[in-house]
Amino acid sequence: MPVAWSHLAAPDKMVHYAVHYRALMDENATALAAVIGARVKKERQSRRWTLDQLAKGAGVSRRAVVNVEQGTANPSVGTLLRISDALGIGLPALVESPGPKPVKVTRRGEGAALWTSESGGRGVLVAGTEPPDVLELWDWTLGPGDRHVSEAHTTGTKELVQVQEGTITVEVADQSVTLDADDAVAFPGDVEHSYSNPGKQPARFSLAVFEPGVGATSRAGASDA
């Protein structure tokens, strides 16, 4: 009889842990959205820009800017990148406290999860540098069947990928490469590209993104005003 009860309890525990995990992720996402929204609003107001001005500079809708500032939406990485570029601060600055820090440490679990999927995939920004030449370091996990499409970044952007576990397919414009564990690839990030997991097991990879001259467009626009 005890064995029978243990078999019945195990699925219940798994469901409980899954629900708890999702609740924790939702809570973390809400907190992160609030941090990003406050930073975007502060940067916009410090420039005395209206919502419409930021939206136009970023190439997004006014509603998108409002949602980001209010922390009421889960914006795509592309939207956040457009807004941070328009502000001239770079994506890492949206998730970090303002002010220069010579040494920035991100402990395990402290990265900013800016992309998630139903199958457990996560795109976590773990480190980044300040403008004008911004370098981002990401820790990506793709669940089976996951695919993340990224629009073309600003001119001159470069990306580096190294697979830690599993297999991924990287598509860059009209090229497609399949990478296994320990394989790496370098490619231009200023064209549309994507990462996908064609396998039945989770895949994990490190991604470095180099975006030169962040803020140049913003500064030019300010001088023209």
Image (spheres, rainbow, N blue to C red):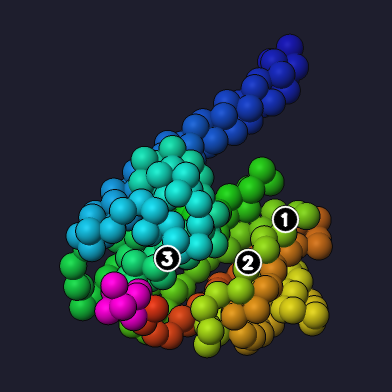
Quadrant in which the C terminus is drawn: bottom left
Query: Does 219 lie within the magenta span?
Result: yes
- For disc 3, the marked residue is 57
Task: Pick whichever of labels 2 and 3 is earlier in the sequence.
Answer: 3
Residue at the disc numbered 1? 146
Give the SS element for disc 3: helix
Q: Nearer the viewer, residue 50 or 164?
A: 50
Residue 183: horizontal and vertical position, in percent?
Answer: 69, 82
Numbered mark located on residue 120 in the image = none
Residue at (50% x, 68% y) in the render: 138
Q: Are the residues tagged 3 and 1 within 8 Å (C-beta)?
A: no
Q: Is residue 223 magenta?
A: yes
For the residues labelled 1 and 2, the Cα–Cα distance comes to 13 Å
State the image quarter where residue 89 is shown: bottom left
Magenta segment main secondary structure:
helix
* Residue range of the region highlighted in magenta in the rendering: 218-225
Find residue 92 and report its horizontal and vertical position in percent: 37, 67
> Which residue is painted at 59% across and 33% down in the image?
18
Residue 161 in sight:
no
Query: The disc labelled 1 sits on which kind of residue?
Result: Asp
Q: Which mark is residue 150?
A: 2
In the image: residue 104, left or right of residue 11: left
Q: Residue at x 69, y 69 (%)?
A: 194
Left or right of 174, for residue 194: left
